[in-house]
């Protein structure tokens, strides 16, 4: 087991890259002797290695870095069908990727995941470290101890201790998280926003998810549902569409992919995003209207996040066909129109592509987070 001191050193090296012992002592406010002892133990355990020497005044500084073969992690996304499974290293790089059909029966799902873990581990390339943990992503609400799926409409699960059960079957620590939280943890560990103490992430796929890093930590809320914007009411007129949650006018009914495709079919258009985008680019009125309405609805929801939380950045993960489209332009225009004017600062909106495998890599980051930071979170 790592001590708090070990985890603090791993935290710095994971976020900032190679550092000297002197730099680590300064950053962590520890004595040089303490850092030297902790580093020695991590080197002996094949977690760190010594790299290039940096010459300056006095004795050359030896840089320390996190070894690629220090450990590996498996991520499993039960967020959609098919299930994606990846194996990653401590730097977030993917070395193995597989898919399998989604099985919602709990016992059958456990059996399938055990088989998937074995298959992915068997294909690990030479030089990848031993498995240190497994992460599972679901669309739903997860307990604060990251073991129990409290409720998932997608899977039809309620109070399923999937984490402890899979851990017992594999002999590895297992961590469970909802889809948006896993994506933002992956971004904080390995993305370009990791140094920001306050940022948010929203994704648009079959549903819409949101998550927030506040003060450097994932904000879960009292019951684990913080960031859930999919069922925020956006449309409140008499034409508001019914939502699967039982209410009307939720953001999901306007801006999620099924909502966009459903609107296209009702208007006699092909039911795929790429064609709708192409038609809108050619000026087809219905396609333009559908994408503009969806982007505007999401922009209203994002403006509420900005007003309530004031993040430095919001990362919006979208289907690749929605990037550089009417949807994206309407989203930005809507945020600009609905956010209170602030002359000295503004929230940075970053639109990037979302691929199904990304949820699995987010899942693997859950295990990597525990390996690097222990129970202290980020």
Image (cartoon, rainbow, N blue to C red):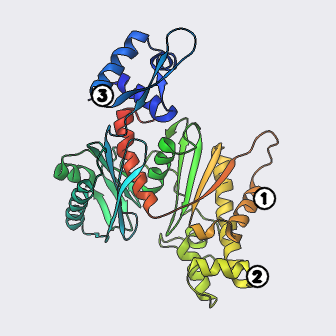
Q: Earlier in the sequence, mark 2 or mark 1?
A: 2
Task: Please say whether residue 184 is visible from this viewpoint.
Answer: yes
Q: Earlier in the sequence, mark 3 or mark 2?
A: 3
Q: Residue 337 has which mark?
A: 1
Tell me the mark number nearer the camera, choosing from 1 and 3. Answer: 3
Please state, as top left, top right, bottom left or bottom right, where the C terminus lies in the image: top left
Mark 2, secondary structure of its residue = loop
Tell whether 168 sits left or right of 7: left
Please state, as top left, top right, bottom left or bottom right, where the N terminus lies in the image: top left
- Rendered view: 274 above or below 337: below
Q: Residue 163 has which mark?
A: none
Question: Where does the image place residue 307, in percent across and percent down from the top left?
Answer: 69, 48
Tell whether 306 sits left or right of 116: right
Mark 3 → mark 2, Cα distance in angstroms: 59 Å
Mark 3, secondary structure of its residue = loop
Mark 2 → mark 1, Cα distance in angstroms: 24 Å
Mark 1 → mark 3, Cα distance in angstroms: 49 Å
* Image point (75%, 52%), residue name: 339
Residue matched to label 3: 2
Q: Earlier in the sequence, mark 1 or mark 3?
A: 3
Residue matched to label 2: 283
Q: Nearer the viewer, residue 224 or 350?
A: 350
């Amino acid at each position: 087991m790592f001590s708090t001191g070990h985890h603090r050193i791993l935290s710095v090296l994971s976020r900032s890259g190679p550092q000297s012992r002197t730099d680590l002592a300064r950053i962590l406010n520890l004595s040089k002797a303490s850092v030297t002892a902790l580093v020695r133990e991590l080197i002996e355990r094949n977690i760190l290695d010594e790299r290039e020497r940096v010459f300056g005044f006095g004795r050359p500084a030896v840089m320390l870095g996190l070894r690629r073969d220090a450990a590996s992690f498996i991520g499993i996304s039960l967020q959609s069908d098919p299930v994606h499974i990846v194996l990653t290293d401590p730097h977030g790089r993917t070395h193995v990727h597989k898919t399998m059909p989604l099985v919602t029966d709990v016992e059958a799902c456990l059996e399938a995941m055990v088989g998937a873990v074995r298959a992915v581990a068997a294909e690990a390339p030479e030089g990848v470290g031993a498995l240190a943990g497994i992460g599972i992503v679901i669309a739903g609400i997860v307990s604060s101890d990251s073991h129990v799926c409290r409720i998932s409409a997608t899977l039809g699960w309620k109070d399923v201790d999937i984490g402890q059960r899979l851990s017992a079957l594999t002999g590895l620590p297992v961590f469970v998280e909802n889809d948006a939280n896993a994506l933002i943890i992956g971004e904080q560990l390995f993305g370009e926003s990791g140094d920001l103490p306050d940022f948010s992430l929203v994704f648009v796929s079959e549903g819409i998810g949101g998550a927030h890093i506040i003060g450097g930590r994932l904000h879960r809320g009292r019951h684990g549902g913080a960031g859930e914007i999919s069922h925020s009411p956006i449309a409140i007129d008499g034409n508001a569409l019914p939502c699967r949650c039982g209410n009307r006018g939720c953001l999901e009914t306007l801006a999620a992919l099924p909502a966009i495709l459903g609107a296209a079919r009702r208007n006699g258009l092909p039911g795929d995003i790429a064609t709708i985008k192409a038609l809108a680019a050619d000026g087809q009125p219905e396609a333009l209207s559908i994408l503009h309405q969806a982007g505007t609805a999401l922009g209203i929801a994002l403006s509420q996040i900005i007003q309530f939380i004031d993040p430095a950045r919001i990362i919006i993960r979208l289907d690749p066909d929605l990037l550089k489209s009417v949807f994206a332009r309407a989203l930005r225009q809507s945020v600009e129109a609905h956010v209170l004017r602030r002359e000295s600062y503004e929230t940075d909106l970053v639109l990037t592509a979302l691929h199904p495998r990304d949820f699995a890599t987010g899942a693997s980051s859950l295990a990597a987070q525990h390996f690097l930071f222990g129970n202290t979170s980020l």
